[in-house]
Amino acid sequence: MHDYVNWLRHSSPYINSHRERTFVIMLPGESLAHANFGAIVHDLVLLHSLGVRLVLVHGSRPQIEQALEVRQLPSRYHHNLRITDRNTLDCIISAAGQLRSQIEARLSVNMAASPMQGAKVRIVSGNLVTARPCGVVDGVDLLHTGEVRRIDHEAIRQLLDQRNMVLLSHLGYSPTGETFNLSCEEVATRAAIALQADKLILFSAEQGLLNDKGDLIREMSLPQARDYLQDPRNTSVRTTLQAAIDASLGQVARCHIISYQRDGALLSELFTRDGCGTLIDQGGFEQVREATIEDVGGLLELIRPLEEQGLLVRRSRDLLEQEIQQFSVVERDGLLIACAALYPFPEERTGELACLAVHPDYRHGGHGGHGDAMFERIRQRALGMGLESLFVLTTRTAHWFQERGFIPCTIDDLPRRKAALYNYQRNSKVFRLPLEHNQA
């Protein structure tokens, strides 16, 4: 029970921030055929009930292959694009129609004791994607294989405004009445760009993007994603990652790659700080910046546990509000995870590095990288003020500061105003860092 309550409390900022946001979610045909799809539907309904505006884009590759096999028709590709003749198109239209019906049926369930009881979800689809033929590529006519020409984003927005969930398939239609087979990745990407969606969420067989050791990469910048795509070892996620990159280049701020095989992956990705997949972030998942008055509540929450342990001197809300301009912070997805303050003493050309704190989930055996980020921020601020040294008073983290070049000194070495306020009951050790020896 405690874990559940704790999770719900920590998820509330995300619930608030996601409300009325537009998410485009790609469901490949493999996800629709997987045993976990029922749980994914329940999670989609939950998002809808929390006020998230959802556009679903589904594929049907395995279902098309099965239909072709039943009719004993060949499956032909050119440059990874399906060659769609008339008979193949009939199979594609049939597969897409059946899946649309299945998705609508799943979202219509309203049984007692079901997670969807009372949901009343309306899902709408239609001729919202205009397409054109790919034409002849390197001498090969791709026939009824097409590409997206336009997404009717105005109509989709109107449907979302009416509290509908919108469903797009991989079929597109031309102004002359032709039907084209499209890539569901392209439809999802183009829809996200046209709608200026807040997120593009791509379900994949993979957990996300993995590093050389097989560990999940939690977040990745756009340049890193493009480098990852060029590595020939990463072919299994190439199509999905390319969609995320294209969306990011189209100004979609955040793209997520998560596994359709993992129960609850969608909720974990959206309502926990670190998620369970890979985030490709156009901006910066973490931001080092100066604190503002709006950060006072977050700072109190961050430093209070350390104050209770006696690691930091207690600061009241009033004092924090008065001294907020002294603080720098690391913000991660709306949460303050590290802070530090600089109190300058211009007459002595020195400054105090104080209140260095890192959220327990991000310490990694000490202050780790976030502590270093804060230290560097304060050092740069001190250099910018023309200060020649930093000093710190600490009771239990002396080694951390010594490892970064601080040397022991005495109370007599402190600025007079600081020395007069020294708390002999805390008996803090004093360390000093000459800045002239550490300039970049």
Image (cartoon, helix red, strand yellow):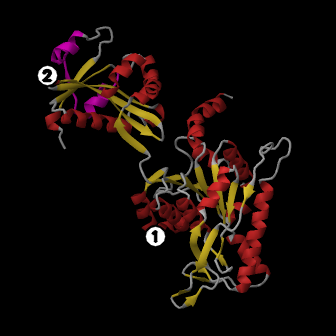
Q: Nearer the viewer, residue 237 or 40?
A: 40
Q: Which mark is residue 368?
A: none
Span highlighted in magenta in the image: 396-420
Q: CA distance from mark 2 to mark 1?
A: 57 Å
Which marked residue is nearer to the observer: mark 2 or mark 1?
2
Q: Nearer the viewer, residue 338 or 188?
A: 188
Which callout, 2 or 1, points at the residue further toward the start of the chain? 1
Q: Nearer the viewer, residue 426 or 420?
A: 420
- Vertical placement of residue 348 versus 288, above or below: above
Left or right of residue 354, residue 125 in this image: right
Decide if residue 366 is in sight here: no
Residue 98, given in percent of the width and then of the height, sits at 78, 68
The residue that appears at 78% across and 47% down in the rendered structure is 120
Residue 279, given in percent of the width and then of the height, sits at 50, 52
Q: Residues within 10 Å of mark 1 (few under 14, many from 20)?
A: few
Tell me the residue that label 1 is attached to: 232
Identity, as a three-letter code, of the amino acid under mark 2: Glu
Left or right of residue 227, residue 432 in this image: left
Tell me the residue that label 2 is attached to: 348
The residue that appears at 42% across and 26% down in the rendered structure is 296
Q: Secondary structure at mark 1?
A: helix
Decide if residue 235 is in sight here: yes
